[in-house]
Image (cartoon, rainbow, N blue to C red):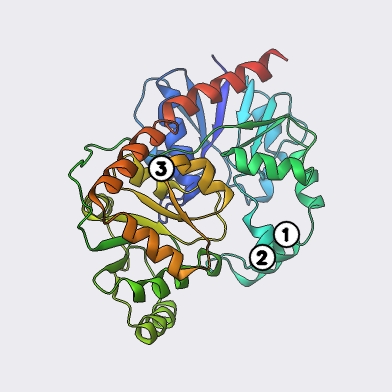
Amino acid sequence: MEGIWFDGRYINPTKPDGITSFSLGLIEEVLNLTPLTVMVDSQQKADLLPKSDQLRIYFTNPVASPKELFSTRRLNREGIKVLFSPMQTTSGLGRNFKLVYTLHDMIYYRHRTPPANFNLFIRIVWFLYHLSYWPQRRLLNLADAVATVSETTKDQMLVHRLTKRPIYVIHNAAQAPERVEKANRHDSKFLVYMGSFIGYKNVETLIRGMQYLSDHTLVLLSRITAERKAELQVIADEVGADVRFENGVTRDEYHEWLHAAKALVSASMDEGFGIPVVEAMERGCPVILSDIPIFDEVAGPAGLRFTATDAIAFSEQVKRLGVKRDWKLHSDLGLTQAEFFTWEDSAELFIELCEELAAS
């Protein structure tokens, strides 16, 4: 289908995040199926896009520029049929094309601490914005349709009546692994965690649970500030937990940890999706997760569950995977479950959405 555009200005070339992963994964697969124009505001972002004869790159102003308010005057001359934004701040004022906004999750309505990398002004605006649902409603209703990455978030949006527009689920996904390690690792003594260390991630429960797993090591893979590391190390020392701080790993190192670990673990109290869960399952690594709705959707029968604040229950689930038969069962279930989340399927849903809007 001609005339599909994607707003690639939310791609972060220096600190890739969930929006970056979603954008690049979806763009790459869509290009295998149809021509696509991607809007960017820098050569750095353009360089991250896949090489394809189906790709057209369109340079424009940054989203935060005052020019964004008038950008549709120029875009209206480009023959756009549908513009898909992976966020909600792409301007659509005075447009003559269909517009899709994306809301990935509603975490910050429940946990209002702004991301630490924002400046003070943005942090204040962010906090005030999430005190009420009405600003989000007004934004989302400016689009013709709204996309989200999970059925869980869609249900939450419906409960809080966030938009009058139709809501479509285009699942998040992960890049297919180069290899799957099927060797039974029930006797591995490593548990791995990949994710941030913000409060609602609840890494403290994982550390406290390690006191009941004296022969195991909890490997925290993500980058961590010195202050946060010190806080978590105090807890580890108090309970006698063996915790290893990697403070960031390469993609290859991350995948090797998934091939070596007994399980990937998370005690998170809230998630937008859970890409590490899919990345673990598709490599045959079992997952032990807090009992929250999004993990139920993503991990399905493959996930071993525990109440997020129950350190003992967490440790008991780890012990279950010490049985060779149980480890293989959950490894196999994970491989099957991961097949529900592929960029190929998401790209097909993306194109169906665009075709439906273009025809309306």
- Nearer the N terminus, badge 2 or badge 3? 2
Q: Amino acid at mark 1?
A: His
The answer to whether residue 6 is above or below residue 334 is: above
Q: Nearer the viewer, mark 1 or mark 3?
A: 3
User: Which of the two labelled residues, at mark 2 and mark 1, occupies the earlier sequence position?
Assistant: 2
* Apparent side of residue 296 relative to residue 304 in the rendered image (left or right): right
Residue pointed to by mark 1: 130
Badge 3 local density, few (<14 within 10 Å), some, or many (20+)?
Answer: many
Sequence-wise, which precedes: disc 1 or disc 3? 1
Q: CA distance from mark 2 to mark 3?
A: 31 Å
Q: Is residue 59 left or right of residue 283?
A: right
Percent position of residue 310, x then y: 50, 68
In this rendered view, identify the residue nearer to me: 217 or 320: 320
* Label 2 crowd bin: few (<14), some (14–19), many (20+), radius 10 Å: some
Residue 216's place in the image compared with 154, above or below, is: below
Looking at the picture, tell me which residue is in the foreground, 20 or 307: 307
Badge 2 is on which residue? 112
* Label 2 with label 1: CB-CB less than 8 Å: yes
Callout 1: helix, strand or loop? loop
Q: Secondary structure at mark 2?
A: loop
Residue at 45 percent across and 55 percent down: it is 289
Give 103 or 169, whichever is nearer the viewer.
169
Inspect this view and state whether residue 299 appears. yes
Separation of disc 1 and disc 3 at Cα?
A: 34 Å
Q: Residue at x 69, y 25 (%)?
A: 98
The amino acid type found where label 3 is placed reads Ala
- Label 3 element class: helix
| Rendering quarter of residue 85 | top right
